Every structure is written in C-alpha cells, then in structure tokens.
Image: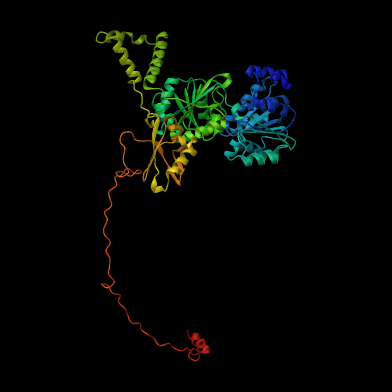
Amino acid sequence: MKFEDFSISKETLRTISEIGFEEPTPIQVSAIPIVMNGGDVIGQAQTGTGKTAAFGIPIVEMAKKGKKPFAIILEPTRELAVQVAQEMNRIGAGKRIHAFPVYGGKSIDNQIRTLRAGVDVVVGTPGRIIDHIQRKTLSLSDIRIVVLDEADEMLDMGFIEDIETILKTTPAERQTLLFSATMPLPILNITKKFMRSPEKIRINPKDVVVPEIKQVFYEVRDADKLNALTRLIDVEDPQLAIVFCHTKRDVDDVAMKLQQMGYSASPLHGDFTQAHRDEVMEKFKKGKLDILVATDVAARGLDIKNVSHVINYSIPQNPESYIHRIGRTGRAGKSGIAITLVSPREYRHLKLIERTAKTTIDKKSLPTSKEVLKAKEKSIAKEITAMISDKKHEGYLKMIEVLAAESSVAEIAAAALCIAYGEPKVAHVNESAAPEQRGNVARLFMTIGRKDKITVSEIVKAIASGARIPGSRIGKIELHDSFTFVEVPADLADMVIHALDDMMVMGRRVQIKPANTRKEFSAKEFDGRSGRKEFPKKEYPKKEFDKKEYPRKEFPKKEYPKKEFSRKDYDVKSVVKDKKKY
C-alpha cells in the first residue's frame, strides 16, 4: 500500500515525500483511514512504529485554521512534546499548519504570547496544559481531535487525573485517538468513559523490531560492565551512541567515569534543568558529543538519525522498554546495532524479552585485549594522518630536529603518543566462568543438600523443569549435607546455570555455578555454604541416676479448719453504715 491510496492532498503527499516517507507502516495503514473517516482509535503500538504520522497526517488533512487550536496532543515528557510538535510542523508545512509545544521548565509568558497569536495544534504535557486552561490562556472549545500519545507512560508518571480533567474541558463530539504500548486497567477505563465506539488496532511486536537493527548481547559480571562498555566503544567506534541505565545515579556514575577515561560523554535525566537538557541534545545532534548516557524517560521520543549504537548498560525492565530503546537506532532506513550487557542472573529475563518481542538476540564474546589495542592504534593513526594533512603539526618540527640528535624519530614519536594517550593498557574483564568439563560432561555445584530435605529425584525434577531438558540427559548427582554436585552435558551447562541460578527450590534460594576445578572439598572437611572447617563433636556419656540414691522427700500436709460462713457475721446494713464512715 502507498500513501497515495489514502486520498491525501497533493501538498501533504509532497511534504511526506520530502521528509523521506516511502511506504506507510502497519500502524499507519490501519489508523489513517479510520481517523480520516472521523472514528475514534485505540492503537496498541510501541515507539518506532510510525505513530506520529499515523495521527499527524489525518490532523493536517482535517485541520480548520482559526484563532483557537483545532487539535491537542498530550505527551508524557517535555522531550516528546518538542519532538512531536517538530514532526507535526514538518508534515503540515505544505498546508502551513502551526503546531506549538507547551511544557514546564520554559517561560510561560512566551507560551502565552504565542497561544494568543493563534496556533492550529497544541502539543504539551498535561500539567502545563491544565495551567494554561486555569489561566484562561488556552481555550479548548474548538478542539475536534484529541490525541493521547504514550498513554501508559502518562499513567506511570501520575497524569491520569490531569488527562480526565483535560478531556472534560473539550467538546463531547470530538474525535479521541489513544496510543499506548500496554493497556493497563486505568487506560481501559478512560477508553470506556471518554471514547465513542473506538476501533482497536494492535501491532504485532515482531513488526516493531526493525530488521536493519543487529541485536547482540554480552554476558559479563556487574563489576565488569564498565570495562566491557569501554572495550565495545573502542572496537565498535560508534558514530553516535546512547547508553541506557535504570537510575539517575547510574547515569551520572557511568557518564562521569567515561569522561574521566577520555570519552566524549554526557548524562541526561530528569534532574537537569530544561536549558541544560536542550544544550546536551543540541551537542549530541550536531555530533559534538559522541555518547549520551540516559534514563528511559529522558531519552523517550528522541529522533536522531545518526545514532549507530544503542547500548543497554542496564537490561530493560520489560520487553516494551527494550523495543523503545533499540528504536533509537536504525532510523530513516539506516542500519544500527543494539547491544545489551547481561549478568548471569539476568539471562532468563533476556530470554523473556526475546520471546515476547519475537526477535533473536545473538550472544557474542567480548573483544580481546589485542583487538582493543588494534582498534585504538587504528583510531590514533587516523587522528595523526588528519593532523598531518591539516598541517597542524608544523610548529613542533624544529623541536623534533633537536630531539633527533639524541634519539631516533621512532622513539620520539612513541614518547609523544605515550604522553598524549597514556600506556597501551586494556582493563581485564571476567566473562562468565566456563563449567569444568570432563569429556562432553560439565560438573556443576549447587548450594542445596540433604539438610534441606531434598532428594536426588527432586533435584532431577528441578533441573529438568527449570532448564527444560530431558531428565535422562542429567548425569551423576552427588548429594552432600549442604551442597550437591551435578553432571550435565557440556553443551547444556550454560542453559542449566542460567535457568536455575538464584531460583527457589524446596523453599530456599539456590545458586548454581561451575564446580571448583582447583580442589575438590569433601563434605567431611568443609561445610558447603560457609566454607568453614567442621570439627567432630565430642560426645559425653549420659549419667544414669539411681532413684534410691536420691529419694524424694515427702512433706506432711498441714490441715486448716474450715470456717462456717454465717449471714449474721456479715450483715449488709452494718456494712453500708460502716462504708459511710470512710
């Protein structure tokens, strides 16, 4: 299908052709005809599927210019509001549609002046939109289309009540378009309350992952992630790279350490002022900054064409987040690389992402020290060649002539490189240990034993069900008091470790790892959990006591005469009289 099949005006067709749109994406094919016919739409699709054009093209085609805005688009973040407003202005350039972003962190006076001058489409965050409504600087009385973009993100950020307030302010006969990666209950409640017989569109996750994006992962320990990251940056030599971390603290820490190592990197998260964030983004877009270290929210909606690498320093928390992240590369038909650093205990989560997104993430080994040094030498040689061609080195030629009288030119050049780049060293990285192999069998160590009331058959069942391998393929099992040795086929060892490590078995958390190859400890010598030496308990004979030797002493019972109770002794009236005395 082509854009010409949508009955779009010549001006808009020319504009989207200039932007570089060739064929409509699945979400655009499904949504554009429905919106053009005046229907409400619920679109379940992730970032990178072409959602902006899916609602942007119909808005431009249906727009009626006036003093008040015709359409309003709600976005969860300032970055997305700016990004979508820019995209709307590009799509609507042929029809002179003016989209304007409103968000916090910018002067509200400038926004008020622009709104009073008149705009066609308002794109903004819910908080600032409500601020303008309360100030009566924004009227929604002429709104014909409302777009709730990234609705689940707005829910996570606590905007659900603000969204309902804004929807109540718009005319009842409006069109409502809702786009969300997931559909939690509060979002479904909004669709029931504020939408009229909406058409539901769901885009298969496998259609979201761009084929041009090469997806790989490297298994490293958490302590070695930074050194692994620098190795990959040195060898891959990305044009522009975005490094994703879970928390703001991680973002600051990783960015600072990269800067200290000489990399052109900068952090980006919500704690920075809007002015600083704009400055960082501008540098990154112009290529003055090579590496952007960011949180998911800060980087959501970024559309930078030359991002060649996306690196998940922290594994995404869910499949949708993974798709959001890798969608930052492979833009405008270009190829890209998505790299994920995974610790052994995160392997199962990665497989969940793989299954849900219906994609394949290939495992790779980290570049060796020799490969890193070779890549560094190549980069240095490139810089030297560029400097010679630009003749920026000529001021040092006389100095070299003087030094050449005492040392060779090669030694002088090597010393200069050492001063500029330091000694050629590569930090060591421990990749996940390989299991001890005996022929085609690997021996594994489990932190569970007889004391935990587990049997050999239960261990077989746990491994077979957890790693999804036949029980018949599990070999010899040595069950000790506090630990167990298990033999499995060598080609399945990694799978068993990844599936069972840190898993609950018989009510306790169990670690599984390659058996120690240096020395095997017997259960008699060492405790499997703590590694402390066990000493034999000294037994003392129990002494038998003879009852005759210690006779029980009998004490005579003292008898007391029973007192007969008489009413005469306790006359009620006399008691009452006595009570009055006190």
Q: Position of residue 431 (x, y in %)?
A: 39, 29
* Total numbered labels placed on residues in the image: 0
| Of residues 533 and 314, the one drawn nearer to the viewer in this rendering | 533
Q: Position of residue 150 (x, y in %)?
A: 61, 33
User: Is the image coloured rainbow, by chain, by secondary structure, or in one colour?
Assistant: rainbow
Q: Is residue 449 left or right of residue 292?
A: left
Q: Is residue 380 left or right of residue 26?
A: left
Q: Is residue 214 left or right of residue 28?
A: left
| Of residues 517 and 76, the one drawn nearer to the viewer in this rendering | 517
Say which quarter of the image contains residue 559.
bottom left
Residue that sits furthest to the bottom in the current view = 568
Q: Position of residue 69 (x, y in %)?
A: 70, 30
Q: Can the viewer see residue 65 in this picture?
A: no
Say which quarter of the image contains residue 557.
bottom left
Give the position of the N terminus as an image quadrant. Answer: top right
Q: Can the viewer see residue 85 in this picture?
A: yes
| Of residues 374 and 473, the one drawn nearer to the viewer in this rendering | 473
Say which quarter of the image contains residue 428.
top left
Q: Is residue 408 left or right of residue 110?
A: left
Q: Position of residue 277 (x, y in %)?
A: 51, 29
Residue that sits furthest to the left in the current view = 406
Residue that sits furthest to the front in the current view = 472
| Of residues 296 and 316, the one drawn nearer to the viewer in this rendering | 316
